[in-house]
Image: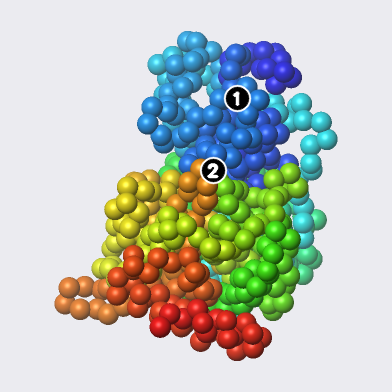
């Protein structure tokens, strides 16, 4: 194996390959897919470790089934992260590596937080790092080039706040934490701050770049060819100047020793962190932009409602079409994706999908992040479930919606399971809670119906969603386990997904997802109360419900939601579609 030969040449006992690009992005461009190139596993999350005599891949519950299939025959061992008895990467390396040996990795792709954690676990064995070798890049023949797509400006009529005002807010946050400089490597934070969008990562409208906010100027490290001349002029007038993308690594070394720099270790790669002069004071905090970006302003909230209305029209048309195809064996998973895309393109301001569509029929539905392709694509049938998880990017915002659709008569078990997932979705959407609650406080509402049946799903209940940005963003989330994001208080303006599910390997999967907008409710002597507004506009499948499992409150919630869907989009449907949608409102 060429990689092991290179490791031996460089004196590395082990080599670490992560999923990230240079900016800790969840999804990455083709240039950065080193882990996929070596392992064949193409999930968005996973870390590969290569040693002299074995290889292992760690991934989370969303990808257990997919990874097992894709790693079959490769000799790579699957480690199911978070499961009982499964060691983490640091513990594994501490047990596997000999004293005084070397761990190699590309420091531009490994976060500072991860590198520090590994260093602590490997300290006793005196294992050192070699973080300056992109070994995969050295052996990758015909590696795709770094993307350099055109950048465009998002008007303030959509952003709701000018670039100047956003910069002023960030500078105030810097003053509050006594930082002279602020390093911003996160692509969606840069896009939000500058009111720009790009296309360097598929589905995520961001541009490869770094930002360094200095006392008297802002430096934008980006491929100059991707920035239009008129935008450069406007930026220059605001003391935002263009520098070469790669120059950040040299410039960061020039931070004055008597100055301080704000860095978010979870977003800053190890090579950048290591380049900061040791004498400079590092203010180690979560990026203030993350919370600013997560709390949508009034303009963004209003546009998001429009985006979801357009998206709901498209999805409802798709569901109607599916329900009325007599022989569903004529349709494949990919054909469903194509048909939905056809409907979405009819929506004004539609720019493209917000992630690779999941159209999973039958047993494929149990693979949480299954994506049909030329090899896996199968025809549907007049039975079981189609799990459809898709989203769109509109000038008005980002959507993410999942519906599980009955394609024929269902078994009592299928209906019972669908109803349990539906109950969880409805219960969370109807939450009323005191200000100060977090995703940990609220997650149980979605899981309770399943937990009562001794069932569960192995993923978070909800993630934050950007505004014409990444479909997954922090810091807000619904999770029952304490981890990053779960300690974030739910603020007015946050958009979070509500997506309980159930996955039975070899049989079917069920997931129902709406996006929820957090809002203020009444304020009483007991404090400020909060609630959710459901943004998603698409009917649930009445044919999949076991009505005896719903109590009167849940039936009322379902009736109210289905009526809302009808009232919002009926006038934009054909008469046949409109009549059918009316029938989806339970009596």
- Specify the farthest residue to the right: 142
Circle 2 packing at 10 Å, graded few (<14), some (14-19), many (20+), is: few
Q: Is residue 400 visible?
A: no
At x 56% / y 17%, what residue is drawn?
102
Q: Residue at the left extreme?
A: 525
Per the rendering, the mark at residue 133 is none
Label 1: few (<14), some (14–19) or many (≥20) C-alpha neighbours in 10 Å = some
Left-right relation of 169 to 394: left
| Contact between labelled residues 1 and 2, with CB atoms less than 8 Å apart | no
Residue 296 vertical position relative to residue 26 in the rendered view, above or below: below
Residue 415's place in the image compared with 27, above or below, is: below
Q: Secondary structure at mark 1?
A: strand
Position of 300 relative to 401 (above/below): below
**In this orientation, does residue 308 appear?**
yes
- Most foreground residue, 137 or 440: 440
| Front residue (pair 510, 259) | 510
Q: Residue at x 66, y 25 (%)?
A: 74
In the rendering, which numbered label is found on residue 76? 1
Front position among marks 2 and 1 = 2
Residue position marked by numbered label 2 in the rendering: 506
Residue at image location 43% in from the left, 58% down from the top? 412
Q: Nearer the viewer, residue 7 or 273?
A: 7
Element carrying mark 2: loop
Seen in the image, is 546 located left or right of residue 159? left
Residue 386 x, y percent position in the rendering: 58, 58
Q: Nearer the viewer, residue 456 or 26?
A: 456
**Which residue is located at x 81 percent, y 31 percent?**
141
């Amino acid at each position: 194996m060429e990689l092991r030969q290179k490791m031996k040449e460089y004196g590395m006992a082990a080599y670490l390959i992560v999923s990230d690009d240079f900016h800790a992005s969840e999804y990455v461009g083709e240039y950065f897919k080193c882990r996929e190139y070596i392992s064949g596993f193409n999930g968005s999350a996973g870390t590969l470790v290569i040693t002299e005599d074995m290889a292992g891949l760690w991934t989370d519950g969303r990808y257990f089934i997919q990874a097992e299939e894709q790693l079959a025959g490769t000799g790579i061992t699957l480690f199911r992260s978070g499961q009982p008895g499964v060691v983490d990467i640091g513990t594994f390396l501490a047990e596997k590596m000999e004293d005084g040996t070397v761990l190699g990795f590309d420091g531009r792709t490994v976060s500072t937080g991860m590198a520090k954690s590994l260093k602590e676990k490997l300290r006793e064995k005196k294992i050192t790092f070699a973080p300056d070798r992109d070994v995969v890049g050295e052996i990758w023949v015909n590696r795709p080039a770094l993307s350099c797509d055109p950048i465009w400006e998002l008007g303030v009529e959509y952003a709701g706040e000018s670039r100047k005002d956003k910069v002023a807010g960030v500078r105030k946050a810097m003053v509050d934490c006594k930082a002279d400089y602020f390093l911003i490597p996160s692509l969606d934070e840069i896009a939000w701050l500058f009111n720009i969008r790009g296309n360097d990562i598929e589905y995520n409208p961001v541009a490869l770049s770094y930002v360094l906010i200095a006392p008297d100027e802002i430096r934008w490290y980006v491929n100059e060819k991707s920035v239009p001349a008129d935008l450069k002029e406007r930026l220059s007038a605001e003391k935002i100047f263009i520098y070469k993308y790669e120059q950040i690594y040299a410039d960061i070394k020039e931070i004055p020793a008597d100055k301080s720099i704000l860095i978010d270790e979870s977003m800053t790669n190890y090579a950048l962190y290591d380049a900061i002069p040791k004498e400079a004071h590092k203010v180690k905090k979560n990026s203030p932009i993350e919370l600013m970006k997560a709390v949508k302003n009034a303009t963004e909230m209003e546009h998001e409602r429009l985006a979801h209305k357009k998206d709901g029209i498209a999805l409802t048309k798709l569901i109607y079409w599916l329900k009325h195809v007599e022989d569903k064996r004529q349709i494949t998973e990919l054909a469903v994706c194509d048909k939905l895309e056809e409907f979405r393109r009819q929506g004004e301001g539609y720019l493209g999908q917000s992630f690779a569509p999941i159209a999973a029929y039958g047993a494929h539905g149990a693979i949480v992040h299954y994506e049909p392709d030329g090899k896996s694509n199968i025809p549907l049938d007049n039975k079981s479930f189609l799990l459809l998880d898709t989203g769109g990017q509109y000038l008005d915002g980002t959507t993410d919606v999942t519906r599980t659709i009955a394609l024929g008569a269902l078994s009592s078990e299928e209906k019972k399971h669908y109803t349990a997932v539906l109950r969880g979705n409805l219960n969370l959407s109807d939450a009323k809670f005191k200000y100060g609650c977090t995703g940990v406080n609220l997650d149980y509402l979605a899981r309770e119906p399943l937990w009562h049946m001794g069932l569960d799903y192995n993923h978070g209940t909800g993630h934050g969603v950007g505004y014409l940005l990444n479909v997954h963003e922090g810091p807000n989330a619904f999770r029952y386990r304490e981890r990053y994001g779960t300690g974030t208080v739910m603020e007015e303006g946050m958009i979070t997904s509500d997506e309980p599910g159930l996955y039975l390997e070899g049989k079917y999967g069920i997931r129902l997802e709406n996006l929820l907008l957090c809002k203020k409710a009444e304020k009483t002597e007991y404090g400020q109360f909060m609630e959710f507004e459901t943004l998603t506009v698409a009917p649930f499948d009445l044919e999949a419900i076991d009505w005896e499992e719903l109590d009167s409150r849940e039936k009322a919630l379902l009736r109210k939601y289905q009526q809302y869907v009808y009232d919002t989009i009926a006038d934009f449907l054909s008469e046949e579609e409109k009549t059918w949608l009316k029938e989806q409102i339970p009596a």
